[in-house]
Amino acid sequence: MADTKDRAPFASSGDDIPASQELEKEKVIENLEEIPEFQQLEKSKARFIIPATIFFLVYYFALPVLVGFFPDTMDTRLFSGFSVAYLFALSQFFMAWILAFLYLLYFAPKIDQMVRNIIKAVEARHIKVSRKGGR
Amino acid sequence: MLHSVLAAGAATSKDPSVIAIVFFVIFVAITLVITYWASKRNKSASQFFAAGRSIKGWQNGIAVAGDYMSAASFLGIAGIISTQGYDGFMYSVGWLVAYLTVLLIVAEPLRNLGKYTLADVLAYRMHDKPVRAVAAFSTLTVTTFYMIAQMVGAGSVVNLLLKLDYNLAVAIVGIVMVCYVVFGGMVATTWVQIVKALLLIAGTIVLSILVLSQFNFDFGKFFDQTTKVQLGKLTAPAAAGATEVTLSTGATKNQNIQIGADGGTYETLKVTDVVNNAPWVYTLADVLNSDVPAGATVTDNTGAQYKVAALAKANTKAIRLDKNLPVAAGTLGLSQKPELSINGQNIKVISTAPASITAKLDHPLANAYPASTIAGSPTDFMKPGRRYANTQEKWGALDLISLGMALILGTAGLPHILVRFYTVPNAIEARKSVVWAMIIIGAFYIMTTFLGFGAATLVGPANVGTVDANGAFVANTNLAAPVLADKVGGEVFYAFIASIAFATILAVVAGLTITASTTFAHDVWYSIIRNEQERPGEQVLVARITAFVVAILAILLAIAMPGANAAALVALAFAVAASANLPVILFTLFWRRFNTAGAVGGLAGGLISSLFLILISFNGPLGANAPFQLENPGIVSIPAGFLSAFVFTFFSKETLSSHKYPEMHFRAETGIGAEVGGEHGLGAVPAGAVAAASPAPED
């Protein structure tokens, strides 16, 4: 692994940590991932992003599948030349916008608050960690 | 109006192009002033590569839109809808929905992990050099294909719109673009993209309103007209009282045809008899190697001789001959199809069609109509699947799904879009910029409805094109928007739209160039060659030199291959991005077990499978004989990319990647330790605050 420089966990590249501390660093990082606030963040994110992603993929791919395999059904006209196919295509834009705004205005602020809590937790943890390390 | 100008020939069509050049010069002047202003701020690497991470979210959103809405969007989609109808709108939908992938999955972790390039994200937890080398190669491949497509588009479209010489147009784009990048870096590139995006949106809104005004802002009437598009046009003027007309498209006996003025007033007549007129347009299985002049002699495999009726350009697949083949080519299998010997080149004939037909009418025309009047049997352009349904084409539906996959997953792997998120202060601003981009891009793509269907109903698919130097009409679907602008807004507006098309290409090319230069300077030079030993100013200097080299290469490539298929090149760029870049980005972010071997294998596997499939498709050198019958390789190459990333992971016992995963994961999700921007936001906490997490030194 001669080509790989180990970076300090969160400092910008350049502040290298001596190799002797490698093990301990790893421990600390494992611990970071185990911070309850972080795990909570993970859970909340997964609860929104996974269903949202599955939803938009299914909604989107329904369009080429329906147009490709069932063009006649999609050809039903609602008024004048305006067809179900066009309405469905148009609805994709609003689906994307609504999902984006839900994420930006409703979900993301919650996540940001959780990140603030994690920062607090990390700072609180610092005392513990450094005491342990200093012993 | 250009409509009449087109018919009158090249001499009079000079005027709108002069106005367009004036508009374009103003655009270049303004953007060069921006570049001069930006050049004074370009001191550090972070300034040059990432605009000092000081671009605001909404500004970056507009810039992303400017970077994304390329000539393919503006000219291409309007053209596809105007000639193929509803199915062309599928591109519009895919290109917007794709941003949900960027917003929900990629943008924020990427901003938190990276510094200047896509490879930064992968290199975070992997062995630096192999991953950077392959990721840089992939980035350069995607950007090169995208770039050639833009440059070729610039050359040919500008050649037609502004009447500039093709090589001159390519050279202008190359030189102006290199000025932006070399002197202005990312700051200037960003502002050029913002100015261009605003111009493009303004032009599109005005054009849409003008189109709707032709229908008295009655959507019912507009959508009704989309169901009655006349595919053909009159190829010669028809006098009132005439009992026969010449049409550009086929009509059959006892069919009704409509000959129309604007806004849906048509005269309906029944065809009593049809006569096919020479010359015959031959569609060939392969491109011509060289120009074939009018009057040359061509022989078929039975020895019969034909005269070439009009100049056939090299790199095109059509030729006009004075008579039809004795056997109809369309009824035979490819192996039995007749073959022509043209300039010593043997090419199969796919089909032949008369250049025009004479239709005898059941009653005399009530009105006189000029040449190019929209005419033919009404076709429903709102009908879904005209191009892609399985009933149209054997693999049509799969092709449509494949295209959708490349669009949806490719955008989140396009390096020139992703690096834009490094220009904002933090992940929160990156998120805002995606939503801003979605508003602008979505509004633009919805309006392609009015551009595309407007051109189909008001100009007619057969009139989308321009006249060449000899006064002959040349079809070119890329010209739908400009021709429509002339029809509904007159010459000055045509000139405005034409200059926007040029500005659009320029801004996208600048974005591609800075991405390629950054990748070379940061990933290849600084990280691999220099072992991350920074010498002051060297990285930026290398990037500037690279930009020059990229510009020269792009100009030479575009001049060397003027007939390159721009749409295929862009599709290729998206397919490569989706097949090579995205699987590796996703696995890096979310799969603990993933490692260097998987990343290298995934990038290489996706790259090779997409390149190979394009090579053996009918977009490649094999033409119609190609074994791979899909237009877009995504449906095969994207799973191949995921699969190779997965399989190669298990070939390696390396542990570094999984050891570094928790650290990367924590930083990706919280932004703690991310590169700090001009303003300190929550998403990018300065490294000092987090040094807290490191253990205190042992006494």
Image (cartoon, coloured by chain):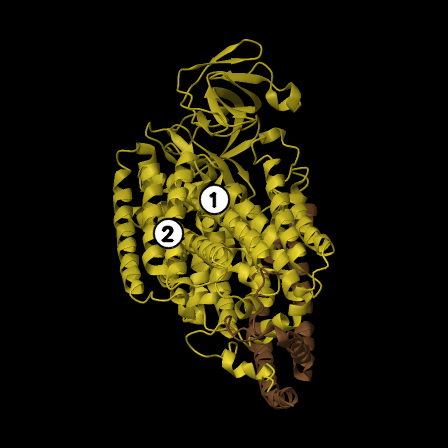
Chain colours: A brown, B yellow
> In front here: B325 or A71?
B325
- Mark 2 to mark 1: distance in Å? 37 Å
User: Which residue is more in the foreground, B301 or B93?
Assistant: B301
Residue at the limit of the structure toward the top, as seen here = B303
Q: Position of residue B450 (x, y in %)?
A: 47, 52
The answer to which of B146 and B388 lies nearer the viewer is B146
- Residue B676: numbered disc: none
- Which SS class for mark 1? helix
User: Which amino acid type is shown beneath numbered disc 1?
Assistant: Gly
Say which chain tag 2 marks.
B
Q: Quadrant of the C terminus of chain B?
A: bottom right
Give residue A28's position: percent from left, percent from top. 65, 80
Dot 1 falls on which chain? B
Determine whether A93 is above or below A7 in the image.
above
In this rendering, which labeled residue sits more in front, label 2 or label 1?
A: 2
* Residue plotted at (68% across, 54% down): B645
Classify residue B340 by image quadrant: top right
* Residues at circles 2 and 1 in contact by the CB criterion of under 8 Å: no
Residue B545 badge: 2
What amino acid type should be assigned to the residue bearing mark 2? Ile
Residue B218 makes an appearance in the image: no
- In percent of width and height, residue B239 lies at 37, 28
Among the 4 quarters of the image, the one containing residue B534: bottom left
- Residue B75 horizontal side relative to residue B348, left or right: left
Which quadrant is home to the N terminus of chain B? top left
Vertical relation: B373 (above or below) A117: above
Task: Specify whether B653 is left or right of B340.
Answer: right
